Each structure stands twice: as C-alpha cells, then as structure tokens.
Image (tube, rainbow, N blue to C red):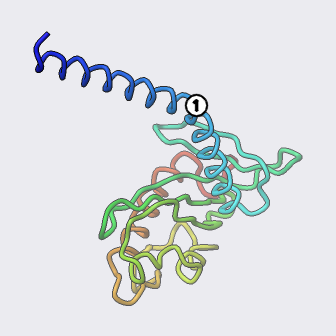
C-alpha cells in the first residue's frame, strides 16, 4: 500500500470515528435539549398569561396557539409566537392575549440579536410592560401609542409590527368578546 492510500484510509477511519462520536453525543443530549426548550416555552406562556399554571397547545389556521389555564381548568388567556425583522435579525416574541377583554396580557422577547445597549433594550420591562393591557384595536405605531427606545427605532418598530400583524390573524380565530 502506498503512502497516499494509507493517508486516505487513516483519514476515513478518523472521520468515521468522529462522526460516530458526534451522532452518539447528539442522541444522548437531544432529549435534554428538547426538554429544556419545552420548559422555556411553558415559562414564557405562563409569564405572558397572568394566572395560568398549565398550557394546552392548539393548532388553528396555520398558527400554534397556547391556551393558558389555571389548575381548575379555567381559561386565563391565549399566547402565541410571532417574529419581527429587527436591525440585526429576527426578533421572536411570545404574546399573551385575552379574547374576552380584547387586550394583551403581556409580551416576552424570546430571542433576538439586536445591538447591546440599544435595540437589545426591547427585552427590558421598561419597554415590554407598555404592552400589558393594550387593546387589540390600538394602532401599535411607534412614537404614537408605542414608546420607542432612543437610538433604536427599528427594534421597537419590528416588535410592534409583528404583534399587530399576528393579532389580525389571532382575532379572526378568537374574536374580541368571544370564548376561547
């Protein structure tokens, strides 16, 4: 066997061993990763729906909705994910909605890659708390009925647009004043 053939055989053997090790570590860690992702989702739903202690996942009209209930099964609100296009990439948001009142119950920024100190401030309660109690009939226009962050208008605008556009679909599924 010449030198090149031997090098190829050794490289293939190393590649196969590395691939097998990677596949094994994926199989071992993936269930834990999925469990943690599910826990993070449930925590976000509980945070945006006050009084919710459990969640029921529902698929309607191409959307995944999470109905928050208390321990007795009383419905407390609906949560849904929406995504806006921020300055540095997508902004994923969990939104809480109470159809009976037609108001938002809260928002939680799930993921974003906005500029630290500027656009990243959309995660702060000073920004997110302004959406609690906001009517679905509001315009969600930055600088008008949504406070913006100085020096970071794109990020708050992305959040507002994402919420407003998704609310249009959600309110068709669960109209204001209706049951859910």
Question: What is the quadrant of residue 17 in the picture?
Answer: top left
| Residue at screen point 63% across, 46% down | 36
Closer to the camera, 31 or 53? 31
Q: Quadrant of residue 94?
A: bottom right
Above/below status of 49 relative to 117: above
User: Element type at marker 1?
Assistant: helix
User: Which of the two residues, 25 or 99, is positioned nearer the viewer here?
Assistant: 25
Badge 1: few (under 14), some or many (20 or more) residues near its Cα, within 10 Å?
A: few
In this view, the residue in front, 87 or 17, is 17
**Quadrant including the N terminus:** top left
- Describe residue 35's horizontal placement relative to residue 8 as left or right: right
Q: Residue at x 55, y 78 (%)?
A: 124
Counting from the top left corner in percent of width and height, residue 157 is at 37, 74
Q: Which residue occupies the foreground of this view, 177 or 43?
A: 43
Query: Compared with residue 85, is residue 125 higher up or lower down, i.e. above or below?
Result: below
| Residue bearing mark 1 | 28
Q: Is residue 154 above or below residue 113?
A: below
Q: Position of residue 130 (x, y in %)?
A: 57, 79
**Does residue 70 appear left or right of residue 99 in this picture?**
right
Q: Residue at x 43, y 75 (%)?
A: 120
Please state the horizontal and vertical placement of residue 102, each as a whole percent of the image. 62, 63
């Amino acid at each position: 066997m010449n030198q090149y053939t031997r090098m190829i055989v050794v490289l293939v053997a190393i590649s196969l061993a590395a691939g097998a090790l990677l596949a094994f570590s994926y199989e071992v860690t993936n269930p834990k990763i999925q469990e943690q992702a599910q826990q993070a989702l449930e925590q976000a739903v509980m945070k945006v729906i006050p009084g919710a202690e459990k969640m029921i996942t529902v698929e309607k009209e191409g959307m995944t909705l999470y109905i928050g209930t208390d321990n007795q099964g009383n419905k407390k609100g609906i949560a849904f994910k929406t995504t806006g296009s921020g300055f540095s990439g997508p902004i994923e948001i969990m939104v809480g909605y109470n159809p009976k009142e037609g108001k938002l119950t809260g928002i939680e920024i799930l993921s974003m890659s906005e500029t630290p100190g500027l656009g990243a401030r959309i995660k702060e309660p000073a920004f997110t708390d302004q959406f609690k109690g906001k009517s679905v009939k509001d315009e969600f226009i930055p600088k008008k009925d949504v406070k913006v962050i100085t020096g970071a208008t794109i990020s708050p605008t992305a959040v507002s647009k994402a919420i407003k556009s998704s609310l249009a679909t959600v309110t068709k599924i669960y109209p204001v004043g209706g049951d859910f």
